[in-house]
């Protein structure tokens, strides 16, 4: 069996990793691994999510991260110092509480924290900036070694990864995938997996399959390196600002993204202004620190906020996209689902490409 | 270590103040940067490196490197070569225990590679999980350069939105000329520079310039800076912003920070980027030892702040910068042990070389520096002869006694802003590195963004001024100013510059320019 995977982000690579022992797998990457959102995100992971399906995938993914690091002998610099969701108003706090009950019922370790507890948890936190929050399992992973590690694992299992190789055509005959054309060459394949992230809509079009994932652009910046003083990953659900401190001591943070019509990654001054205001409101001692660099990334999300995973009406053309801002959080488990779809013909109603 | 008598420069020092370095009082004068005041007081270790905790000292002096990051009044990671002393200022070294000069973690330098070589944080101690998680947590404890801020930054924060015709980034010879020529044609100009003065690197050029009279030959660089600055003062349509750092060009919007407290959001019709260049370094053993300096850094220390870099120096590189620096050092009463030059012949102008030789400084051609010797600062250097394949000749090593080493091997364009703005860039060795593709008036592939001066290709101040004039006036013309008179002036300067480059030293530049100059029209 031959499988062609389009996209070498977390979804493409974890799918390849799980398929490698049962099939001949080639991963096609238009640019290079890390170019897309898997190389541009801030690495926050947690099962403190808002739906049963996402929580399950997130819990499973943390277990996978634990085992894969040993299997491929590569440290993803996963730091489980907790995940903190804070809200600035009662409405948002109520929303978090609803999620909290769901999370609790599914066995996620999470508890409510008041602003002064948060202040004790994070040096310099301004308790007046929030109404309250929830603290639970999760933390920060460094996305780059995740991709490097999966790449290493894939290659050791015989997967071929082709960077700078653009897929120009998905060959479909009689409603069935026959292969694809990339950099002018034809590759025969029984299955073509669309794991192209923000570019998934375009790839889907090549197979003649309609996909209407929402494309979201998000900006991030990094401050100069400091001794560790922020342990948990902090997300303010009211204004979208989030931040954490990397293994190198840099404060990495951004603002949740907005829908755009095309995937493009230019940075803006307005983002810096907004981020500075919101981050300083939350942790006033960040004021006066220098921004080292800034960048933007794009990702795609299923219209209902859930991933799109499953076979389409073109036989052998598999969607594996739409993970939204949860790519790092649920990617490893999503890759396993892709393998199940291909190897065992499984379908997942909640994620089905046919559900829209 | 402060110079009192200098044959050319007169140092006007401000009021005496006291700053505190790791708690110890140090005498300084208003107008001096923290870095230069510390240097004058004999401080040589400014920081410790991130991983190996190697001592790092003064290096570039113009805010381009990270050797002088310190904590100033509780705020971490401040480049102290860009901060001016204030009475009572508290300055502390970072990432060291108890301080940078006597860092106990310095021991890591000799052992860390044996047990935990570079990159091993991904590959070692991965199994079992418990060990991996323990090590990952512990290693994090060593990360980070500065301490978390001890208090909230007290500076006020404000915001200004500016609409104007032309934004000029950099107040060196190119930027000043661009501002003057655009303003004379009638354009409204905002001229921004990160320093509290205009002139860029001209302010340390105490020597006379060459060329014809029209190109201000025979005038010292510092004098040219004053002439241009005076001209700018006269032009009411130039708004000069000092201590203003431009950090990005976002789709025609220029982002800058003025005096660490005001954010500027500038919407100009055209932009001239004249950010200059920074110094290159050289790979040799111990090249990060305090006492190994950029030539420009030494010029800044000596010619701007009047502080002696040391007692005896070794100069690496015999281009004009190396030769001129040599006699500037001798003017300031500093000995120069030797000049080494990797090429088989001297790189700079004959007149400069002859002058240096008359002063008794040996120039070793086909020699390079092999290592800096010393534990916490330079105590000597080892040089070695190179064969025709640029390989060191065994047994030809020479020890040169010196207490500082100047790297004068050339400059690289400060191209980051152009890259960020989206300009098409090319690597052109003749022009010093990565430079933007442009048309003959300096407009890049991003419409409305111009380049002039060293950032367009390493040359020297005379050419930089002409490039600045061309860019400035062309921008003004495109906006609709100046009429036929401006067109005439523009073509005149283009001709002048072409003529200026026709000499033997211009051939290399012309060859380089051919690779990046677009035909008529451009963007």
Image: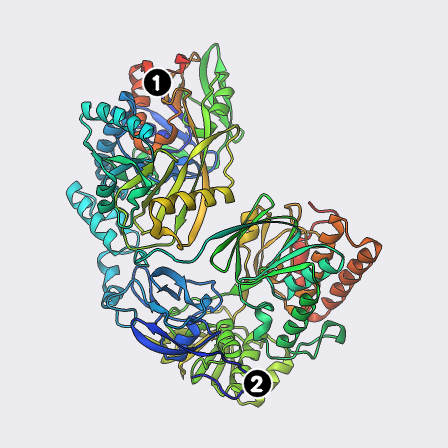
Checking the image for residue B83, the label placed there is none
In this rendering, does residue A103 appear at all? yes
Q: Indicate left or right for B186 with A145 as reference.
A: right
Q: Is residue B12 above or below residue B46?
A: below
* Residue drawn at the location 27% of the way across and 69% of the way down: B99
Q: Is residue B446 above or below residue B289?
A: above
Q: Are marks 2 and 1 in contact (CB under 8 Å)?
A: no
The total of numbered circles placed on residues is: 2
The foreground one among B86 and B103 is B86
Kindly indicate the quadrant of the structure image that contains residue A252: top left
Checking the image for residue B356, the label placed there is 2
Q: Nearer the viewer, mark 2 or mark 1?
A: 1
* Residue drawn at the location 20% of the way across and 49% of the way down: B135
The foreground one among B143 and B52 is B143
Q: Which residue lies under the disc numbered 1?
A: A351
Chain containing the residue with disc 1 = A
Q: Indicate left or right for B435 with B463 as reference.
A: left
């Amino acid at each position: 069996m031959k499988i062609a995977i389009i996209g070498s982000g977390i979804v493409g690579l974890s799918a390849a990793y799980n398929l490698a022992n049962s099939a001949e797998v080639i991963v096609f990457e238009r640019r290079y691994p890390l170019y897309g959102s898997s190389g541009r995100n801030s690495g926050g992971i947690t099962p403190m999510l808002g739906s049963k399906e996402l929580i399950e995938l997130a819990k499973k993914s943390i277990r996978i991260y634990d085992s894969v690091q040993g299997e491929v002998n590569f440290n993803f610099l996963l730091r489980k110092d907790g995940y903190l969701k804070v809200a600035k108003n009662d409405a948002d706090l109520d929303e978090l509480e609803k999620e909290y009950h769901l999370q609790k019922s599914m066995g996620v370790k999470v508890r409510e924290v008041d602003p002064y507890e948060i202040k004790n948890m994070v040096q310099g936190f301004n308790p007046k900036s929030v109404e309250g929050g929830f603290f639970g399992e999760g933390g920060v992973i460094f996305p780059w070694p995740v991709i490097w590690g999966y790449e290493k694992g894939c290659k050791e299992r015989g997967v071929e990864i082709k960077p700078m190789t653009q897929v120009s055509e998905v060959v479909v005959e009689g409603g069935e995938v026959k292969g694809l054309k990339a950099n002018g060459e034809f590759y025969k394949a029984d299955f073509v997996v669309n794991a192209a992230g923000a570019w998934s809509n375009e790839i889907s079009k090549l197979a003649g399959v309609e996909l209407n994932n929402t494309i979201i652009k998000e900006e991030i910046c990094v401050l100069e390196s400091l001794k560790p003083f922020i342990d948990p990953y902090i997300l303010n659900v009211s204004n979208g600002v989030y931040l954490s401190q990397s293994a190198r001591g840099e404060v990495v943070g951004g603002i949740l993204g907005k829908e755009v019509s095309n995937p493009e990654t230019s940075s803006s001054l307005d983002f810096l202004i907004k981020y500075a205001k919101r981050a300083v409101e939350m942790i006033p001692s960040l004021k006066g620190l220098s921004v080292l660099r800034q960048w933007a990334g794009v990702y795609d999300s299923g219209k209902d906020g859930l991933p799109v995973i499953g076979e389409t009406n073109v036989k052998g053309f598999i969607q594996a996209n739409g993970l939204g801002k949860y790519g790092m959080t649920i990617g490893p488990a999503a890759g396993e689902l892709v393998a199940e779809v291909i190897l065992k013909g499984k379908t997942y109603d909640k994620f089905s490409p046919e559900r829209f | 270590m402060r110079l009192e008598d200098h044959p050319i420069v007169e140092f006007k020092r401000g009021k005496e103040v006291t700053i505190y370095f790791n708690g110890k009082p140090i005498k300084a004068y208003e107008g001096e940067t923290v870095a230069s005041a510390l240097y004058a007081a004999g401080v040589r270790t400014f920081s410790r490196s991130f991983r190996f905790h190697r001592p790092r000292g003064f290096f570039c002096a113009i805010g381009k490197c990270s050797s002088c990051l310190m904590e100033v009044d509780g705020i971490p990671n401040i480049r102290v070569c860009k901060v001016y002393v204030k009475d009572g200022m508290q300055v502390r070294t970072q990432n060291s225990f108890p301080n940078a000069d006597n860092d106990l973690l310095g021991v890591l330098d000799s052992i860390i590679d044996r047990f935990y070589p570079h990159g091993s944080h991904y590959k070692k101690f991965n199994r079992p999980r418990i060990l991996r998680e323990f090590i990952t947590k512990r290693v994090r404890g060593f990360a980070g350069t500065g301490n978390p801020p001890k208090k909230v930054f007290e500076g006020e924060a404000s915001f200004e939105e500016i609409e104007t015709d032309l934004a000029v980034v950099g107040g060196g010879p190119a930027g000043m000329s661009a501002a003057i020529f655009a303003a004379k044609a009638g354009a409204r100009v905002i001229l921004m520079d990160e320093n509290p003065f205009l002139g860029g690197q001209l302010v340390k050029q105490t020597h006379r310039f060459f060329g014809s009279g029209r190109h201000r030959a025979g005038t010292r660089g510092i004098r040219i800076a004053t002439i241009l600055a005076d001209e700018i003062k006269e032009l009411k349509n130039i708004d000069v912003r000092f201590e203003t750092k431009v950090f990005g060009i976002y789709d025609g919007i220029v982002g800058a920070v003025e005096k660490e407290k005001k954010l500027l959001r500038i919407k100009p019709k055209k932009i001239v980027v004249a950010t200059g260049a920074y110094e290159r370094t050289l790979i040799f053993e111990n090249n990060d030892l305090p006492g190994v300096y950029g030539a420009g850094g030494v010029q800044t220390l000596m010619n701007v702040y009047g502080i002696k870099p040391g007692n005896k120096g070794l100069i690496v590189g015999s281009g004009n910068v190396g030769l001129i620096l040599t006699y500037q050092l001798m003017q300031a009463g500093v000995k120069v042990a030797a000049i080494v030059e990797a090429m088989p012949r001297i790189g700079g102008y004959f007149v400069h070389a002859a002058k240096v030789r008359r002063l008794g400084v040996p120039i070793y051609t086909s020699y390079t520096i092999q290592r800096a010797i010393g534990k916490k600062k330079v105590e000597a250097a080892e040089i070695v002869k190179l064969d025709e394949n640029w390989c060191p000749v065994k047994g030809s090593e020479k020890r040169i006694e010196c207490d500082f080493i100047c790297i004068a091997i050339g400059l690289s364009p400060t191209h980051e802003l152009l890259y960020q703005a989206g300009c098409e860039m090319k690597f052109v060795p003749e022009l010093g590195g990565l430079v933007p593709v442009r048309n003959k008036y300096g407009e890049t592939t991003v419409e409305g963004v111009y380049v002039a001066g060293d950032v367009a290709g390493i040359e020297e101040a005379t050419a930089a001024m002409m490039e600045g004039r061309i860019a400035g006036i062309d921008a003004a013309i495109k906006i609709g100013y100046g009429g036929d008179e401006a067109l005439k002036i523009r073509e005149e300067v283009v001709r002048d510059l072409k003529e200026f480059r026709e000499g033997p030293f211009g051939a290399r530049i012309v060859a380089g320019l051919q690779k990046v100059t677009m035909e008529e029209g451009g963007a």
